[in-house]
Image (spheres, rainbow, N blue to C red):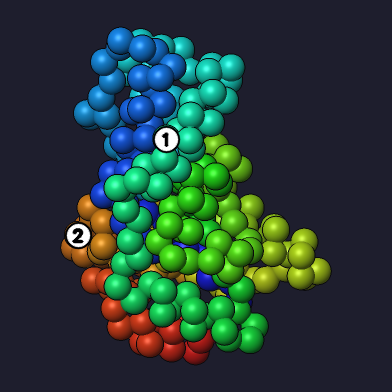
Amino acid sequence: MLVLFDIDATLLRTDGAGIRAMLSAAHELFPGREFSFGGIEVSGRLDTLIWREFMQRHGIEPTADLHGPFRRLYGEHLQRGFAGSCRSDALPGTRELVDALHAMSGIDLGIVTGNYEHTGTLKIAKAGFAPEVFRFNGWADDGEHRRDLPRIAMDRHASFRGSRLSAERVTVIGDTPHDIDCARHNGCRSIAVATGTHPQAELAEHKPDLLLRDLRDWQSVLSWIACR
């Protein structure tokens, strides 16, 4: 089996450290200009798409030549923030669930997230997770749409293991409708947790296979995954 976790508001919470680092990167690239994320949806979206909308909203063409420096500076500012006062805290039950799944024979772990690989890895490590536990991943760097990411993680798993899992043996865990949608699009199962900005009632409308308030009762989540 393969279990794929979202990062922000699913595994951990950074209280806006990523947005602050993005703003700092923009200010460094364009000194003296005013930038804001007001009106830009960030929850569950790919960083590449957030970046494009952010640039366009401020009258800047989001070219590939600009994206590279922005991406690099974003990572540098996030790393500085984590070295200082910025936090990345594991949400209740997540470390226990990850550790228990990792210890089980026949279960592999991965990430499907809107984060760039370098910044997502920083967040995971700062929250106390071992990044190497998550071996089969889909990052914002890998696709143009959230729906692309489970397939990319599954392709990497198949390449490494030498055989392809059926989609129903893959579970995506996330806190947004985007996570539920990308799982369903690829034929995977979904676990939705109301630990982000989307309440349980809203997530229920998207019909995840399992809906939870949070992952505190990680033993029950472990049993649900294992029995399938």
Residue identifier under label 1: 77
Local secondary structure at mark 1? helix
**Circle 1 Cα neighbour tier, 10 Å, few/some/many (<14 / 14–19 / ≥20):** many
Give how far apart the Cα atoms at labels 2 and 1 are: 31 Å
The residue wearing badge 2 is 199
Quarter assignment of residue 16: top left
Q: Earlier in the sequence, mark 2 or mark 1?
A: 1
- The x, y position of residue 111, in whole percent, is 53, 59
Residue 127 position within the rendered picture, expressed as x and y whole percent measured from the top left: 40, 61
Image position of 131 with respect to 211: above or below? above
Helix, strand or loop at label 2? It is: loop
- Residue 43 visible to the viewer: no
Furthest residue toward front: 84
Going 81% across and 69% down the picture, which residue do you hit? Answer: 162
Nearest to the eye among marks 2 and 1: give it.
1
Left or right position of 183 against 109: left
